[in-house]
């Protein structure tokens, strides 16, 4: 098996019928990756079913942009049955069970998008913010219930606080990064592993699963667990973090409580 930091796909057989294929979600150079692409296509030809992260709509949107990455190569060249592990999932419902409200989920994604852009270029307008949140609808099923309009409306109030306190901005950004990490593990527990097990139950033949490299090791370990633990809820997860991201998270939680506590989506 290739190392986790390898820029080419990794291949790991977990069960006799399940193969995890780890990739990076980034565009590739066809010439530099030509040998790897051929090996990738050869692996695809050995499979009867191929599962992907995300839903079909998000992959179709990437295809329309003309992107060249391993996911798009698989979608174009795989001749068997394709499955999308998040097609019928609902992130908001899953996260609510973990203790994360609709509005807090939306605000974390907004803060991450804003802070990333601001740290890089010192500017981020409401149009870009709205585009960032609208894109999340394609990536995270159920995100449309996060009340994007309300988030866009109150975000300037949050921005005013963050832009006059660089330390607070950095704390909120680090908190948003920790939320993304938490969401990654929640996806593994609540969506990917159950989805893979359902494929094994419902279909015969060889099953390939194309996942981001940051998912592969964790998904593998969960699949091989005799007794699978429930994933930690949001509050105890945050209590184990360093002080800086904890402070950012608490600030955002209080902001959401103040501005969304009367909203049905909160």
Image (cartoon, rainbow, N blue to C red):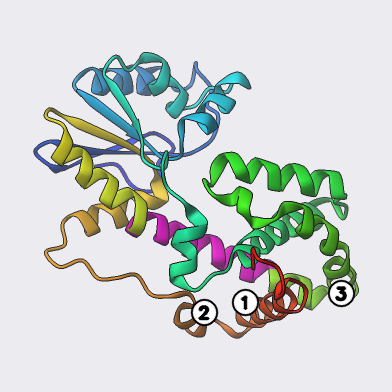
Region in magenta: 173-189
Q: Secondary structure at mark 2?
A: helix
Using the image, tell me which numbered label, if any, was put on residue 238: 2
Task: Tell me, yes or no, whether the highlighted magenta stretch contains residue 179.
Answer: yes
User: Going by the image, does 104 lie left or right of 193?
Assistant: right
Circle 1 residue: 245
Does residue 200 lie above or below 122 as drawn?
Answer: above
Residue 106 position within the rendered picture, expressed as x and y whole percent measured from the top left: 65, 59
- Which tag is nearer the camera, tag 2 or tag 1? 2
Which residue corresponds to mark 3?
161
Q: Quadrant of the C terminus?
A: bottom right
Question: Tags 2 and 1 in contact by the CB under 8 Å rule?
Answer: yes
Of residues 118 and 252, the one nearer the viewer is 252
Snapshot quadrant of residue 139: top right
The tag on residue 265 is none
Earlier sequence position, callout 1 versus callout 3: 3
Q: CA distance from mark 1 to mark 3?
A: 17 Å
Q: Few, some or many C-alpha atoms within 10 Å of disc 1 (few <14, some 14-19, many ≥20)?
A: many
Q: CA distance from mark 2 to mark 1?
A: 8 Å
CA–CA distance in space, label 2 to label 3:
22 Å
Magenta span: chief secondary structure: helix
């Amino acid at each position: 098996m290739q190392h986790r930091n390898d820029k080419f796909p990794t291949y790991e057989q977990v069960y006799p019928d399940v193969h995890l294929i780890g990739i990076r979600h980034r565009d590739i150079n066809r010439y530099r990756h030509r040998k790897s692409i051929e090996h990738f296509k050869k692996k695809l030809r050995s499979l009867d079913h191929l599962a992907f992260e995300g839903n079909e709509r998000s992959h179709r949107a990437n295809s329309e942009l003309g992107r060249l990455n391993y996911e798009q190569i698989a979608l174009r060249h795989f001749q068997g049955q394709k499955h999308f592990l998040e097609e019928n999932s609902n992130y908001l419902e899953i996260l609510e069970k973990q203790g994360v409200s609709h509005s807090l989920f939306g605000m974390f994604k907004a803060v991450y998008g804003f802070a990333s852009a601001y740290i890089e270029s010192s500017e981020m307008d409401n149009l870009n913010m709205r585009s960032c949140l609208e894109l999340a609808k394609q990536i995270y099923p159920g995100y449309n219930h996060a009340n994007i309009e309300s988030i866009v409306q109150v975000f300037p109030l949050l921005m005013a606080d963050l832009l006059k306190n660089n330390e607070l901005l950095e704390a909120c950004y680090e908190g948003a990064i920790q939320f993304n990490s938490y969401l990654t593990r929640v996806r593994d527990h609540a969506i990917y592993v159950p989805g893979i097990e359902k494929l094994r139950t419902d279909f015969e033949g060889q099953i390939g699963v194309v996942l981001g490299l940051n998912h592969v090791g964790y998904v593998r370990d969960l699949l091989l667990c005799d007794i699978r633990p429930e994933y930690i809820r949001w509050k105890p997860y945050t209590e184990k973090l360093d002080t800086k991201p904890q402070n950012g998270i608490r600030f955002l939680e209080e902001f959401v409580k103040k501005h969304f506590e009367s909203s049905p989506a909160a």
